[in-house]
DNA sequence: GTCTATAACGTGATAGAC
DNA sequence: GTCTATCACGTTATAGAC
């Protein structure tokens, strides 16, 4: 498990390296293909081809498809929660400001990488607990300044008295769901990719307003 | 394509038949397994086992895994949109009432079959357009009384002036997203299945209130 | 480290007896 | 219609030359 952690770190450091090593090329390609097709539907040959390397090298560097997948998965989940941690634990910003920052961050991230949420949700069905522990998701979210601020606001009667889970589901639902459902949405309303993207940009401003209303509702 | 439609209908009529035929047993089992694992990860042998039949019979009745999948897929999407149509096109109910009914319907459906949304969203990446046409999803939603009421309310200045897509995403996001993300949510907050279900029951009342606030927000 | 060749296995599908 | 046996193929993984 330590080994896996090390290799996972390696992938994250892969930014702007002059000439990517074979190992790095494989990981980059694996990330793309796994995210697009999911574990079961991707063949190691697809990854090798996308990486422009001989497919035997994949096993040389990572032993198995499964191991390679675990590394990619771990990093993707890490990415999903890491910046959330920064935003959620900033003691300087208000509850409302945090919502705004979360919406902004995720809409930017998912506009660039729309496959992330469906990938994470799908693969979490096969073992969420392990992953959540490895990235410390529970601590990041539930022990955050954000939650404390929420509970304080409830105590002061400023917002509706409800468990914070509802609030989490609301913010993520409003922000992340459109990306998950984008094939359906685009089919329903005849949206081009560009039009969809600008809708999401609009939501950066709208979601904080909406959430503010939701919080006060009785 | 006519043939496929007929077989798809057959599956829907499968309720409370005294002794299910082999064909029906296969479809029921296929539905369960496909919904749980997705197309790529399920083996026809899994389906045969779940149905309690010889795995050669699967090909005898349905020619291929692919054909069988299409039937299941079509019915699942149909189910997802059918009752929506009834609710959305009722001229007797108000906009607010419709939101309430949609939330109620989906929370009931997804509590019983939590795998449906992730299944639909995943498989729609490989061809949403065809499916949407086959079930007439675009007409059901975009030409509905619901949309007309929405546009009327905008014209009268009763609600915020925004394209109805945002509204659709909001209602579905608040209602459906929690089921998609349930493995993550349960991991974050340490919820049992029962606790999760009762949270969703709570949302039946909350979502209509929240949506009302969202609509008015400026 | 990288390649070719091939092993080992699983899976979808069919032939043919009953 | 149902079963057993088997084929044909694709896929992961490895052995071994370079």
Image (cartoon, coloured by chain):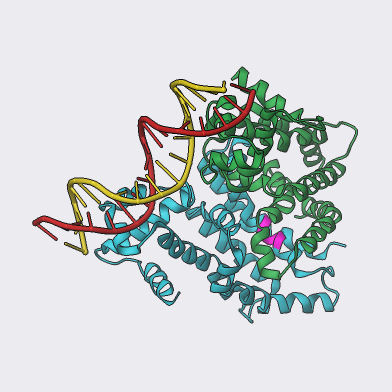
Chain colours: A cyan, B green, C yellow, D red
Choose top left, top right, bottom left or bottom right for residue B80.
top right
| Residue lying furthest right | B92
Q: Residue at x 68, y 61 (%)?
A: A171
In the image, taking residue B21 as reference, residue B201 lies left or right, namely: right
Relative to the observer, which residue lies in front, B57 or B135?
B57
* Residue A163 percent coordinates (x, y): 79, 69
Query: Is B134 above or below relative to B165?
Result: above
* Residue B110 percent coordinates (x, y): 75, 48
Quadrant of image for the N terminus of chain B: top right
Q: Residue at x 56, y 25 (%)?
A: B60
User: How many numbered marks are there?
Assistant: 0
Choose top left, top right, bottom left or bottom right for residue A188.
top right
* Residue A183 percent coordinates (x, y): 57, 41
State the extent of the magenta-drawn residues as a range.
A169-173
Relative to the observer, which residue lies in front, D7 or D14?
D7
Query: Is B84 above or below relative to A203?
Result: above
| Residue lying furthest bottom | A91
Quadrant of image for the C terminus of chain B: bottom right
Query: Magenta region, mostly helix, strand or loop?
Result: helix
Query: Is D6 above or below relative to B7?
Result: below
In the image, taking residue B172 as reference, residue A127 lies left or right, namely: left
Q: Residue at x 63, y 81 (%)?
A: A92
Residue A213 falls within the magenta-colored stretch: no
Choose top left, top right, bottom left or bottom right for residue B82.
top right
* Residue B136 percent coordinates (x, y): 67, 27
In the image, taking residue A205 as reference, residue D12 lies left or right, namely: left
């Amino acid at each position: 498990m330590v080994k896996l952690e090390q290799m996972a770190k390696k992938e994250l450091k892969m930014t702007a390296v002059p000439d990517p090593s074979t190992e790095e090329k494989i990981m980059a390609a694996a990330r793309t293909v796994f995210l697009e097709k999911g574990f079961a539907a991707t063949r190691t040959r697809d990854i090798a081809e996308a990486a422009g390397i001989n497919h035997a090298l994949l096993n040389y560097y990572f032993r198995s498809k499964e191991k390679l997948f675990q590394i990619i998965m771990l990093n993707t989940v890490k990415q999903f929660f890491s910046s959330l941690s920064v935003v959620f634990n900033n003691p300087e910003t208000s509850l409302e400001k945090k919502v705004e920052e979360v919406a902004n961050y995720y809409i930017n991230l998912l506009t660039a990488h729309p496959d992330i949420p469906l990938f994470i949700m799908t693969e979490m069905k096969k073992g969420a607990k392990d992953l959540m522990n490895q990235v410390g998701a529970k601590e990041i979210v539930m022990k955050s300044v954000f939650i404390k601020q929420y509970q304080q606001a409830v105590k002061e009667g400023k917002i509706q008295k409800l468990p914070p889970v509802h609030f989490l589901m609301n913010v993520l639902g409003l922000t992340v769901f459109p990306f998950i459902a984008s094939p359906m949405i685009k089919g329903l309303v005849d949206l081009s990719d560009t039009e969809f993207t600008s809708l999401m940009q609009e939501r950066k401003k709208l979601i904080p307003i909406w959430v503010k209303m939701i919080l006060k509702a009785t």
